Image (cartoon, grey):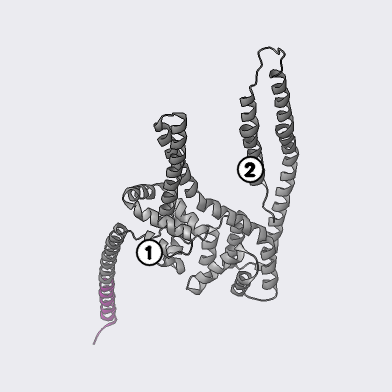
Amino acid sequence: MSTLSDLRKKIEEKKEEKKQTTAGKDAQETVDMDKVEKIVDRMKKKYREQGIEFEEVGGKLGELRGIIAEGEQAKINVQTVEDLQEFQSPAIKSLGKLYLMLRLPLDPVSGLIKKLPLANDVRYYLYSANMKYSLQQWLALSLAAATLAGIFSFAVIAALSFVYKVNLLYSILISGAVGMFALVALMLVPKSNAQRRGDAMSVELPFALRHMATELKSGIGLYKTLQTIATSDYGVLSEEFARTINEVEEGTDTKDALRHFALRTQSKALRNALLHIIRAMKTGGNLSDIMNTIAEDVSFDMRIAVREFSEKMNFFGVIYIFAAIVVPVFIGIIGSITNAPISVGSVALSPIAIAAIYLVAMPLVLGFLVFYLKITQPKVG
């Protein structure tokens, strides 16, 4: 007959056997996972060599890995340059065809750009701006357009060089600079579009937040409220909420989908609002009151921005009057005096110099002032 100590001994032995079995299984699973990772890495390397792009986000944008691992964005992006021929835009088709024709010299350039930190930013901003291109496709379009710009500028400058007997080397250097400038400008287009999209969302944000607060206060759940905003007429903001709803419907947790939304948007006010919503969902706060408070804060920030802009306009008006009225009149007077049949000392302005000032310098200065006014104008509707 077994004693109590014998029973305890048997129980301890069974526990020890169970631990060893579990440890063995875990080790086997770890080994299997390592094998799987190695296989996946080999497959990715093989497909990249064939031109298939895996849209991954790293570096400072590493938090967006959840977007790659879940939902609609989880699918491997196999959009290649050849797929540009399926776009409806004739310009996109033509640029894609040009890249394929010049693929031999342009592919190394594209590969070099992909190794730069700029490539990760371009990939992120393409996603943020909701532009339907992979990084590889955008690089192909940018390189093709830059090549066209370089060829066109070379043809024009070469013709002028032939007429005015200028060294052809200048044509090559200038056309190369034009092509580089065009490439850099096109690489910045996704960021510009993403920021413009963020500004458009900031304009609609106070109204959408009050709408959400009213829905939540009436007893409607957060998910239904998000669906209402997605189907309402809030422009770009509704489109972005629709993207979030798609993520949730594909299995992403609501908090994670909202976090992805906050990470991809370029609107600081919207990002703060989404982070407050996520925090309230975790701690159980009153979402309706939080929405109203955030809406008031955003509206206050917009009023402050408008007030500061109006104060800047007073000084800007003085500068513009001086550049657009005083300076041209002064130059006209000096030009008239220096070209008159009287002696005015060493001051002299030839008709060509006056024409250059009026036709080139002044339009550039005034254009810069207007451009500065445009970019500093607060986006409030």
Viewed as shown, does residue 35 lie left or right of 198? left
Q: Nearer the viewer, residue 18 or 313?
A: 313
Q: Give the label, 1 or 2, closer to the camera.
A: 2
- Left or right for 222, reference 191: right
Counting from the top left corner in percent of width and height, residue 21 is at: 26, 73
- Specify the quadrant that holds the N terminus: bottom left
Residue annotated with mark 1: 78
Rendered position, 200 above or below 352: below
Q: Which numbered circle lies on residue 371?
A: 2
Residue 115, magenta (yes or no): no
Q: Is residue 57 visible?
A: no
Nearer-the-camera pick, 132 or 238? 132
Name the secondary structure under disc 1.
loop
Picture quadrant where residue 348 is located = top right
For label 2, count other residues whose C-alpha is less than 10 Å away and answer few (under 14), some (14-19) or many (20+): few
105 is higher (above) or lower (below) than 369: below
Which residues fall within the magenta stretch? 1-22
Q: Is residue 137 above or below residue 375?
A: below
**Which residue appears at 40% of the width and 53% of the height?**
140
| Quadrant (top left/top right/bottom left/bottom right) for the C terminus | bottom right
Q: Is residue 180 left or right of residue 210?
A: left
